[in-house]
Amino acid sequence: MKINSAKFEISSPDVAKCPNSDKNEYAFIGRSNVGKSSLINMLTGRKNLAHTSSTPGKTMLINHFIINDEWYIVDLPGYGFAQRGKDSRDKLRKMIEGYILDRQQMTNLFVLIDSRLDPQKIDLEFMEWLGENGVPFSIIFTKLDKLGPEAGRRNINKYTKTLLSQWEELPPIFISSSIDGRGKDEILDYIEDINNMTIS
C-alpha cells in the first residue's frame, strides 16, 4: 500500500468525542516509551505527524490521523507509566478501555512491544484482557535496530514461547524499526488486506 496523504484530524479526551465516521480505524498502543509515535511517522512517511518525545507518557488523548482520505490511524495513550498519580492513571485507563471496547470502527489494535525487553507482566496481562474481550489485535515488536539479528530472533522466540503458554494460537506478529523502516511494507499490506475485505 502506498500512503499518499496523512493528516492529523482530531484529539479526543474520550471515545464519545471521536470522529463521527464509518471509516476503518487501526489503533496503536503500548507501554510508555515503546516507540509508538516514531512507528506511526515511519509508516506514514511523515517525520512529524505524531509528536515524539523523550518524556514517557506524553500522549494523553485519542489522536486520529486520516490516511489517504480512506481510513484512520489512531494513536492511543501509552499504559503503565508509574509516575502518574492514581487519578490520572484511572482516567487514562477508562479512556483506553472505552475506545477499545466501545469504538465499533476500530478494525484492529496493534500492540507494540519493545523487542529488547523480557516479557513484561503488564503487556501480557493487557493482551490477556484483549483476548477475554474478543478484541482483534496484532503484535508489533519495535526497536529491532537496537539488536543484532541473532539477539532479535532470540528475544522474539522467547516472547512467543511465553505467549503460547497462555494462548492456543498467536495473533499476527510483525517486527519493526522506525530507524531503518523494517516492517513498514508488511504492516501496511496487512492493513490493506483488511481494508479490501471490509470496505465495499
Image: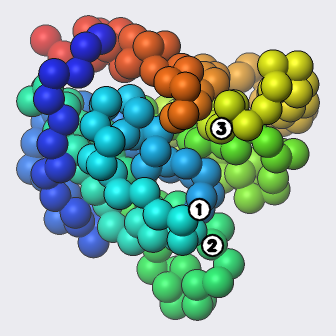
* Residue holding disc 3: 143
Q: Earlier in the sequence, mark 2 or mark 3?
A: 2
Q: Quadrant of residue 118?
A: top right
> Badge 2: few (under 14), some or many (20 or more) residues near its Cα, within 10 Å?
some
- Inter-mark Cα distance, 3 to 1: 14 Å
Q: How is the image coloured?
A: rainbow
Q: Amino acid at mark 1?
A: Ser
Task: For mark 2, give the secondary structure.
Answer: loop
Tell me the residue that label 1 is attached to: 32
CB atoms of marks 2 and 1 within 8 Å: yes
Residue 40 locus on image (x, y percent):
39, 40
Q: Please tell me which of labels 2 and 1 falls first in the chain.
A: 1
Mark-to-mark CA distance, 2 and 3: 19 Å
Q: Residue at x 88, y 27 (%)?
A: 151
Q: Amino acid at mark 2?
A: Phe
Q: Quadrant of residue 172?
A: top right
> What kind of residue is marked 3?
Lys
Mark 2 = which residue? 81
Label 3, secondary structure: give it: loop
